[in-house]
Amino acid sequence: MIKIENLIYPLAVILGIVLIVTPEYDVHISFLFWVALMFYCMLNIEKRVLLMLFAFTVFVFCMTRIVIPEYYINDFIQDSQLYSMSFSQDVHNFVARACFLSLVGALVGFNLVSANINSDYRLNIDPNSYQITQIRKISKYLYLLSVILVVYSIYTRFSFVAAYGYMDSYIDYSNSLPTVLSKFASTNALCFYLFLVTLPSKKEAKPILIVFMLVAVFSLLTGARTGFIMSLITLLVYLLLRNRIDPYDPWLTRKVKIAILFSLPFITALMFIVMLMRGESSVSNISFVDMVINSIYQQGSILEVLGVSYENADRIPYRIWSFGRVIDSYDNNFLFQI
């Protein structure tokens, strides 16, 4: 009997052919493949979480501004289209095709790599050995010490944002910590990851993970959302990896997965509220559904980069952008010129 997972490649081929034959439906077809790929990842999320996160990123940052208006329009979306760059359907089709190729390439590459690496996550270390326990202990205390400095830095930036605005914080704000303490604060993430890689028990890891997420939530006061989202992704990936290391004692249970799934709309709405609080725009009488959709739509600003690049391709030298540095080196290198 054919597994559902095995249908993803025939679907990619069929949709690729349809993309070529009917370019007027490029956006819908690319979105359909993205939905199918996300479903494919959900069938084995522990194994395919990185592929799922890549697909999620492609949608949020590249596809939202071409997909959402096809199915849903509100005042915020209409205003955004009026006051930001608007592109022709040809540009939208180009972006849709580019995203489709990216998703197919990621699918093929991910499965090729997965088939050629050892999928056994039982690491060849003893988490209870003296050396590992000492590393765990030292990294934990260094992390907690550095957290104090990180929280102080977040507070000073929040104070600046409250007084002068979010955008000015990228120009005029500077950390008031002495250089030595600032350098120590920058080791915060390193100490955190070093602690996690020693495979602490649930009991020992839980308070550290809670502190990690509390700091991420506190960072929202500065108006920046990326750190919070990256912290959520880091936590999710680690919990799923621990599930694979010890499947008989899962860190991310089925109930927790369901809770995370249901909390996503609320987290997304919160990101939109943070955007409003930092003063970029204002809306009134907005529903919860609109907050979620607007938050997702607003992230797709890469459309503007791709759109401008596509429309001005004839004026951009060396359009094989991935090899730009290689081409520059060839042109400017004395030996190559000879």
Image (tube, rainbow, N blue to C red):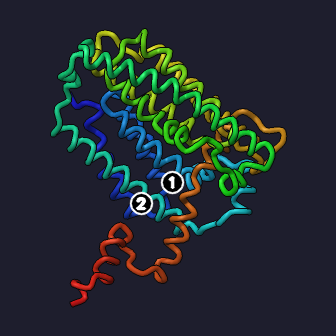
Q: Residue at x 53, y 62 (%)?
A: 92
Q: Mark 1 points at which residue?
A: 62
Q: In which quarter of the image is the C terminus?
A: bottom left
Q: Which residue lies furthest to the bottom in this view?
A: 338
Q: How crowded is mark 1: few (under 14 residues within 10 Å), some or many (20 or more)?
A: many
Look at the numbered discs 2 and 1 and tell me whether their residues touch, using CB distance below 8 Å: yes
| Image quadrant assignment for residue 102 | bottom left
User: What percent of the width, then of the height, locates residue 242?
Assistant: 34, 21
Q: Can residue 301 be seen in this view?
A: yes
Q: Mark 2 points at which residue?
A: 98
Q: Is residue 290 visible?
A: no
Give the left or right position of residue 258, taking residue 163 as reference. left
Q: In which quarter of the image is the N terminus?
A: top left
Q: Which residue is drawn at 58% across and 28% down?
A: 148
- Amino acid type, callout 2: Ala
User: Closer to the camera, 146 or 123?
Assistant: 146
Q: Which residue is drawn at 35% across and 20% down?
A: 136
Q: Residue at x 34, y 78 (%)?
A: 328
**Rendered view: 320 above or below 232:** below
User: What percent of the width, then of the height, locates residue 50?
Assistant: 36, 37
Question: Marks 2 and 1, Cα distance to the nearest angstrom?
Answer: 9 Å
Q: How crowded is mark 2: few (under 14 residues within 10 Å), some or many (20 or more)?
A: some
Residue at disc 2, secondary structure: helix
| Image quadrant assignment for residue 274 | top right
